Structure formats: C-alpha cells, structure tokens
Amino acid sequence: MPRKRSALTVAVVLGLMALLPFAAGVYYAHAGSSLDARTAMRWLLPYLATIVAFIGGVQWGRMLARGQASARDMTLAVLPAILAWAALLTAAPWRGLLLVVALLFAWLIDEHGARQGWQTRGFLQLRRALTLVVTLSVAAIAWRVMRG
C-alpha cells in the first residue's frame, strides 16, 4: 500500500516545482542578452499574476475550512489578485513592481492569517521561502533588463 504524504509535504514539493519557471527565467536572462531578459520578464509576469490569484484562493479556502471567514479577511485576500490584474495592464517597469507588491501583500495577509488562526505555521514558513525566492528572481531579471 502506498505511503500517504502530508499535505505540507505535497505543498513543499509543488511549491518547489512552481519555482522552476523563475529559475529558468533568471538563467535565460543572465545567460543571454538583455533582450532575453526582457523576454523572460514578459513570460514570467503573467505567471506571477496567476500565482497571486491562486494564493488568494488558498487563503479563502483556509478561512472557510476553519470557519473563520470574516468579510474583512476575505476582502483582503482578494485585493492582491485585483492589484496583480491591474499590474498586467500597466507598462514596464510598473508591471513588475506592482506584481511583486501584490505578492508581498498576499504574503502579509498570510502572516495576518497565522495571527487569526486560519493559516498554519508550516504553510506560512513555506510561503515565506517561496515569496523570497520569487521576489529575488524577479529582481535579478529586472536588474539584467535595466543593466542592458
């Protein structure tokens, strides 16, 4: 009989897999020309917007599953996705900056969720690490774009 893995273990594996496009983007941006860096940014930013929206859905799910879905917290969980969508409508460099702000805002909502009791410690630690790697990856690619 197959061994059952914990939800956190699965989340760690899937979270690491979700970082692969960012690692590829950093490599592509720094191994090639600044045009390659712009290309990497162009295909990573919509992916980042999708991730921000996904995080909001996870937050809602955790709130509802724990029976702690206040209107305020549910509203907060939607705002990063709206910001991410609006960011996609802007031009560079605002697009990347606003998407990172949306990601960081979503992370702060998870921190708030831990204090409210609907976010678990293990998941929060994972979110911190993933958010840091994504933020640094976008910064590394943006630096390559600006450096030319």
Image (tube, helix red, strand yellow):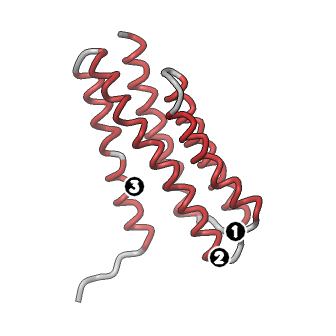
Callout 3: helix, strand or loop?
Answer: helix
Residue in the image at 39% along x and 11% along y: 147
Secondary element at image label 1: loop
Identify the mark at residue 24; answer none if there is no mark. none
Rendering coords of residue 136 (x, y %): 45, 33
Q: Quadrant of the N terminus?
A: bottom left
- Spatial distance from mark 1 to mark 2, Cα to Cα? 8 Å
* Residue at the disc numbered 3: 15
Report the front residue among 125 and 97. Answer: 97
- From this viewpoint, which residue is outermost toward the front? 89
Residue designated by label 2: 66
Q: Earlier in the sequence, mark 2 or mark 3?
A: 3
Q: Residue furthest bottom?
A: 1
Amino acid on which the number 2 mark rests in the picture: Arg
Query: First in sequence: mark 1 or mark 3?
Result: 3
Front-most of 35 and 6? 35
The amino acid at mark 3 is: Gly
Above or below residue 72? Residue 34 is above
Viewport quadrant of the C terminus: top left
Residue at 53 percent of width and 49 percent of height: 128
Relative to 106, residue 98 above or below: above
- Which x, y percent locates residue 88? 50, 34
Q: Count the numbered circles shown.
A: 3
Quarter assignment of residue 74: bottom right
Instruction: Name the disc covering residue 117, or none.
Output: 1
Q: Is residue 121 above or below residue 3?
A: above
Image: 38 above or below 130: above
Label 3 Cα crowd, 10 Å radius (few <14 / some 14-19 / many 20+): some
